[in-house]
Amino acid sequence: MPKNANYKFHLGSDDGSRLFVDGEQLIDNDGVHPMSFKTETKQLPAGRTRFAAEYFEKGGEEVLQLDTEGGGLGTLASAP
């Protein structure tokens, strides 16, 4: 992360997903559902941070999207 700051994470998926930051679950967007987002904010120190996303697809549309903002990242950093 570029600096010590609050970072906002937006995790969207069709169907279930979860986001882990440094081994701790931050977002639980589990279940069978159409594309939907959940958002959480976390204070992070400057430097390396480990991220992991889990995702499953039951059928239909296949989407997983993670957007991050804050800490000097610009308006929005996205990892589709």
Image (spheres, rainbow, N blue to C red):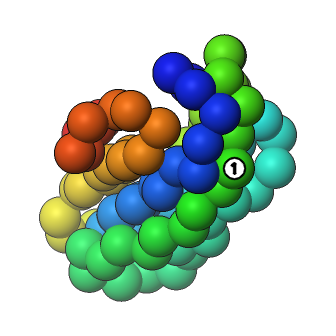
Q: Position of residue 47 (x, y in %)?
A: 66, 16
- The image shows residue 66, relative to residue 3, as above or below, that is below
Q: Quadrant of the C terminus?
A: top left
Judge by depth and name the residue closer to the eye, 52 or 32: 52
Q: Label 1 neighbourhood size at 10 Å, few (<14), some (14-19), many (20+)?
A: few
Q: Position of residue 27 (x, y in %)?
A: 61, 65
Q: Secondary structure at mark 1?
A: strand
Q: Which residue is mark 1?
A: 43
Q: Which residue is rendered at x = 35% and y = 32% of the image?
A: 73
Judge by depth and name the residue closer to the eye, 64 or 8: 8
Q: Position of residue 51 (x, y in %)?
A: 62, 33
**In the image, is 79 to the left or to the right of 61?**
right
Asked if residue 45 shows in the view, the reply is yes
Q: Quadrant of residue 12?
A: bottom left
Q: Quadrant of residue 62?
A: bottom left
- The image shows residue 4, relative to residue 39, as above or below, that is above
Judge by depth and name the residue closer to the eye, 24 or 74: 74
Q: Residue furthest top?
A: 47
Q: Which residue is rendered at x = 31% and y = 77% of the image?
A: 36
Tell me the kind of residue under disc 1. Gln
**In the image, is 62 to the left or to the right of 27?**
left
Q: Position of residue 22 (x, y in %)?
A: 78, 35
- The image shows residue 5, relative to residue 38, as above or below, that is above
Asked if residue 56 shows in the view, the reply is no
Judge by depth and name the residue closer to the eye, 24 or 69: 69
Q: Which residue is rendered at x = 67% and y = 16% of the image?
A: 48
Q: Quadrant of the N terminus?
A: top right
- The image shows residue 56, relative to residue 78, as above or below, that is below
Q: Which residue is rendered at x = 58% and y = 62% of the image?
A: 41
